[in-house]
Amino acid sequence: MADGEDSELLSEGPSHTRFLLGRIAEEAQRAQALEDPLEQAKALALLIQPYAGWALREAVWDCRGKDMKWSVIAPEVGLSQAVLSRQVRANGPVVTITPYYGLDSRNADGRTPLRLAAFSLEKRVIALAMTTTDERSQLLARLYIPVLAMGQAMAANQAEPLLKTVKEVLRQADGLAPSVAGTEEEKAVLDAVGELGTALERYQGTIRVAEELKQAAESQKGE
């Protein structure tokens, strides 16, 4: 069990994480079926986002219940040890994303949907490469190298290399018929490509502006 400071907060009952994840999945399906964007916004704000925060708190408690240290958990969820432990001990949901109130407060692409979509595609392509036995897979032949290059661009955390490699991935995927996806893993890759394309259309301008503001701020610091 975790240290004495946490023992009073930890329950001996079963983990509630799976139940909360199930609720998130249910509400996400309902929201996806809604045609009214206002109703979707309401579902996201009042149900899905709060459930996600509470589910993360439960998952962190599960880790603590297995004697994992705050210093081990915190980097995995993208928070400092102090911030994570303070949020959890406050008996509230754990929130990892900082609110933005202006473009000048953002990094180049941070945790925007474009980066999330790129991560999702990279993960699915790598998983496909590790599981497929068909060396003739058109998806792997067309996307594997461009997706790896996109992953390297994400690590560099600069706007233009990321946008360039994302566009190359989409160019390579253009024209691939749905019929090339013969397995569930391949269908997941095509779905991720579609997500990446919509994210690029919506967020590339924002990313460029944020990058320019970031560079301007760094220049002013150097003067």
Image (spheres, rainbow, N blue to C red):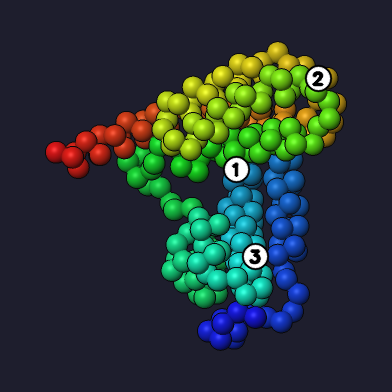
Q: Which residue is mark 2?
A: 136
The correct choice, above or below, for 205 with respect to 116 in the image is: above
Looking at this view, is 27 or 160 the one in front?
Answer: 160
Residue occupying the far left of the picture: 223
Going by the numbered disc 2, the residue's amino acid type is Arg
- Residue 53 appears in which quarter of the rendering? bottom right
Q: Earlier in the sequence, mark 2 or mark 1?
A: 1
Q: Which residue is mark 1?
A: 38
Q: In the visual, does 94 lie left or right of 221?
A: right
**Percent of width and height locating residue 203:** 49, 31
Can see residue 134? yes
Q: In the visual, does 167 lie left or right of 123?
A: left
Q: Secondary structure at mark 1?
A: helix
Which residue is pictured at 29% across the width and 34% down the height? 215
**Percent of width and height locating residue 22:** 76, 57
Q: Which residue is mark 3?
A: 59
Distance of label 1 from label 3 (alpha carbons): 30 Å
* Residue contact between numbered discs 2 and 1, judged by CB atoms under 8 Å: no
